[in-house]
Image (spheres, rainbow, N blue to C red):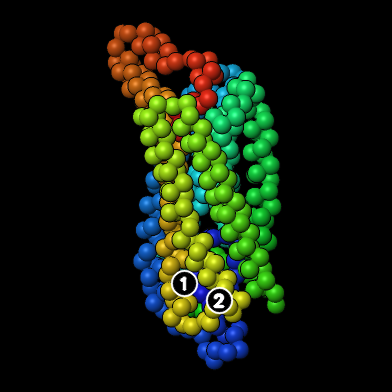
């Protein structure tokens, strides 16, 4: 496969050399149209995703922080709340790398090699972490609703912190490939410096195929299977103990969660699978196919990145209790501002800090404070 995309985009670690490495092709394909499209599309798409993801995930972090401040113990809230916290951090870190790669398309890579390695590693790290935290959230919902796991155990988030630590450690190990192999240089068909994965080895195709397989399994296949199994079992359980209206609402929510994940990440992984088949020579390469794959991978990768902006909507704001807490937070902020201009500051401050409701009332439920099925 002879794509230019693999060099530039901060995707899961991959590498594909150019057509001059292929014995059956006498000259490289013309990549001018690919570069032209990418320079028009990528900066705008990355910046839009960056803005939406930062706003949404920062709001999630503020809401979680507001609740945590009212509970002094670090193990005060449920497993889902902990996974949601780490998901928001992961999505936020991923979003913060996008301006670097957006600027690359505008003026080339103007930063150091060290920043190239760190930005690429953060990108890969948080792509993996994000989807795995989504799987953890669905598994926790499954335990809470289908098996009705005792809430006193589930509310001990020290256990969830351990699980999150294991996920971070495993994903850091995978992202170490970026730290080792990323480099800055000028590539064929593009006259500016770029940050790319530089596997200087005769086995670069083996590296790429191996990483694409890991990406497909760990970054899409495994989380999707976990989500499908957990949410199907959740809906089946709710059918036996919920009203018709509750079942309809739960079904719509479950379908939306799975459908959005598939819609965002399935196209990218499909095109990457086709790319792998071309590398294995199961599909015959051609310049036309290379161009289609280059453009398709760029567009679908951006669609996958948009999931970082959709996660706060799906896993946070859709919950009734979460929306209520967010409203109280805004009410507190507005109330505090007004109180600075009145003689009733102390009274208004005290009223705005009054908790909207005790978590103890939620502990008897099978859903958490930030639960998507609450």
Q: Quadrant of residue 151?
A: top right
Mark 1 neighbour class, 10 Å CA radius: few under 14, some 14 to 19, many 20 or more: many
Position of residue 39 measured from the top left corner of the image (x, y, whole percent)? 39, 67
Residue nearest the viewer, comparing 250 with 35 = 250
* Relative vertical location of residue 6 with respect to residue 366 in this rendering, above or below: below
Q: Is residue 50 left or right of residue 8?
A: left
Position of residue 359 measured from the top left corner of the image (x, y, whole percent)? 51, 18
Question: Circle 1 is placed at which residue position?
Answer: 293
Q: Secondary structure at mark 1?
A: helix
> Can residue 257 be seen in the rendering of this structure?
yes
Q: Is residue 188 left or right of residue 299?
A: right
> Can residue 345 be seen in the rendering of this structure?
no
Q: CA distance from mark 1 to mark 2?
A: 10 Å
- The outermost residue toward the bottom is 26
How many marks the image carries: the answer is 2
Q: Secondary structure at mark 2?
A: helix
- The outermost residue toward the front is 240
For residue 278, the mark is 2
Image quarter (top left, top right, bottom left or bottom right) of the C terminus: top left
Mark 2 neighbour class, 10 Å CA radius: few under 14, some 14 to 19, many 20 or more: some
Q: Earlier in the sequence, mark 1 or mark 2?
A: 2
Residue at x 40%, y 26% (from the top left corner): 243
Residue nearest the viewer, comparing 119 with 152 = 152
Position of residue 372 measured from the top left corner of the image (x, y, whole percent)? 46, 33
* Relative vertical location of residue 171 with respect to residue 242 in this rendering, above or below: below
């Amino acid at each position: 496969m002879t794509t230019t995309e693999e060099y530039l985009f901060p995707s899961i670690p991959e590498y594909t050399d150019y057509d001059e490495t292929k014995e059956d092709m006498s000259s490289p394909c013309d990549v001018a149209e690919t570069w032209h499209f990418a320079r028009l599309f990528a900066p705008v798409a990355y910046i839009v995703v960056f803005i939406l993801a930062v706003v949404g995930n920062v709001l999630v972090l503020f809401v979680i922080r507001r609740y945590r401040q009212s509970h002094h113990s670090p193990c005060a809230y449920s497993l889902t709340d902990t996974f949601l916290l780490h998901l928001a951090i992961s999505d936020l870190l991923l979003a913060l790398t996008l301006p670097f790669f957006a600027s690359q398309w505008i003026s080339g890579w103007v930063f150091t090699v060290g920043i190239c390695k760190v930005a690429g590693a953060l990108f890969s790290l948080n792509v993996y972490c994000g989807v795995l935290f989504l799987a953890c959230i669905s598994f926790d919902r499954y335990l809470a609703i289908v098996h009705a796991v005792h809430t006193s155990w589930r509310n001990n988030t020290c256990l969830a912190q351990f699980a999150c630590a294991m996920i971070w450690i495993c994903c850091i190990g995978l992202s170490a490939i970026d730290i080792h192999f990323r480099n800055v240089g000028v590539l064929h068909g593009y006259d500016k410096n770029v940050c790319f994965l530089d596997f200087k080895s005769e086995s670069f195709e083996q590296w790429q195929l191996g990483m694409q397989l890991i990406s497909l399994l760990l970054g899409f296949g495994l989380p999707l299977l976990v989500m499908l199994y957990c949410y199907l079992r959740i809906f089946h359980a709710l059918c036996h103990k919920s009203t018709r209206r509750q079942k309809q609402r739960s079904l719509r929510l479950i379908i939306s969660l799975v459908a959005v994940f598939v819609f965002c990440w399935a196209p990218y992984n499909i095109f990457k699978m086709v790319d792998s088949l071309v590398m294995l020579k199961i599909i015959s390469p051609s310049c036309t196919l290379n161009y289609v794959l280059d453009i398709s991978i760029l567009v679908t990768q951006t669609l996958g990145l948009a999931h970082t902006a959709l996660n706060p909507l799906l896993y946070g704001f859709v919950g009734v209790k979460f929306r209520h807490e967010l409203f109280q937070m805004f009410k507190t902020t507005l109330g505090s501002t007004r109180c600075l201009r009145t003689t009733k500051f102390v009274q208004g401050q005290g009223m705005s800090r009054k908790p909207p409701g005790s978590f103890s009332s939620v502990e008897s439920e099978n859903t958490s404070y930030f639960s998507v099925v609450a």
